[in-house]
Image: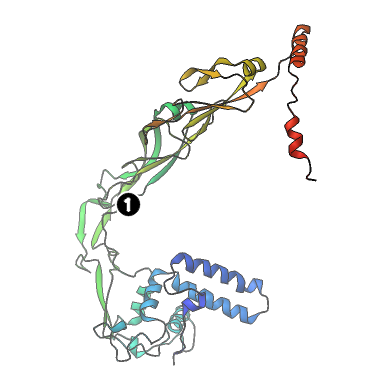
Amino acid sequence: MPSTSKKDYYETLGVGRTADADEIRKSYRKLARKFHPDLNPGDKAAEERFKKVQEAYDILSDENKKKVYDQYGFYADNIPPNGGSPAGGSGAGPNFEGFDFAEFLKQQQNAQRGGAGPAAGFEDERFSGGGSGGFKDIFSQFFGKGGGKQAVHPERGADLEYGLTVDFWQSIKGTQVKLNISRQETCEVCHGTGAAGNNVVVCPECDGTGTVTQMAGAMKFNLTCNRCGGTGRLKNACPNCRGEGRLSRPDSVEVRIPQGVASGSRLRVAGKGNAGTAGGPAGDLYITIRVEEHPFFKRDGDNIVIHIPLTVSEAGLGAKIEVPTIDGRALLKIPQGTQSGQKFRLREKGIFNGRKNTRGDEIVEVSLKAPDVRDERTRELLRELAQVQTEDVRSAIWSKVQPAV
């Protein structure tokens, strides 16, 4: 007699019935680590809990198994005892009351391994369809590689990713590059059908539908046709692509790098990914840009930052100096009394942003460079400067560091 015990796999994993695959996986990993026999040697309770967690995850992590469990459960509460359809649906079906699906699956697996006793000879009249189709066949379709119609439909090809490194000036000015990539292209012999010539015929087993009907008691199931694999067609494989419909080929792609492109930017080249199947469109090629750093110009968003040294006389008296920009040279006015670390802005001397149709600025940070004293005349001038400039430039420091009285 099969077990009638109820098993709530969601409760076993500690997740709600609306949990998505990621939540289920995270909860399983947490519990598996906690109750794993290797981490709990000699603890039978932990071992049993680990088996239950593993069983629950085996069901809920498999899309087809989860669908069956959500629809029927591994107990009879959601199947009307009169043999009606689940959840108040119409139509007739076998009586699942009191039947433990988990026990049934376990016994079927034992039988496949050649086990003896009740498991090997297990049978239940509610799941015998009489003839060749019984519920065991249906069950294997749910939990095996079948699970539904797999008719061929046009599918878009996969996108491709490519990393490209450009130098600083290429990113500033923009450029055109040629990439040599490998992509799947439609086979020119079979034109993507995968068949040799026009030798494609309708499958006689399913009449081209891709599915066949099997009965389990009063229940009727549409299952994937084993003969054609759900395609509805029989064909001889194309010798050029071996039935794949596509071939990996080298390809040369011209790519325009826009002006002002930054590291991490992602460019899209439409239709240059892998070819689609069954006449589906090709995927796209995505190019991730990495920009090499420049030894002098530093990029900050759309701005350019540079550091310029000043002499003591330029900082003290003021001056007009030439500074480099990404366009060439520009004149910068240094006001009298400029301090080291002071920053100046050159408007619209930065990087062009094509999306905003604007241009950044250049930020010039200055630093004072002490004179290199190599002769007596320079020393005399500095001594004279020290006699004239008697201000204690560090006086403000002491008022800030004195402890409170």
**Left or right: residue 279 compared with residue 405:** left
Q: Above or below — where is 226 with respect to 344?
A: below
x then y, percent, for residue 353: 40, 33
Q: Above or below — where is 125 with respect to 32?
A: below
- Tell me how the rendering is colored: rainbow
In the picture, the quarter occupied by the N terminus is bottom left
Q: Above or below — where is 41 with respect to 234?
A: below
Q: What is the secondary structure assignment of the residue under circle 1? A: loop
Instruction: Place residue 133 in its image quadrant.
Output: bottom left
Q: Give the residue drawn at x 49%, y 75%.
A: 56
Q: Give the residue drawn at x 20%, y 59%.
A: 201
**In front: 72, or 294?**
294
Q: Give the residue drawn at x 48%, y 69%.
A: 24
**In front: 200, or 38?**
38
Amino acid bearing label 1: Glu
User: Residue at label 1?
Assistant: 244
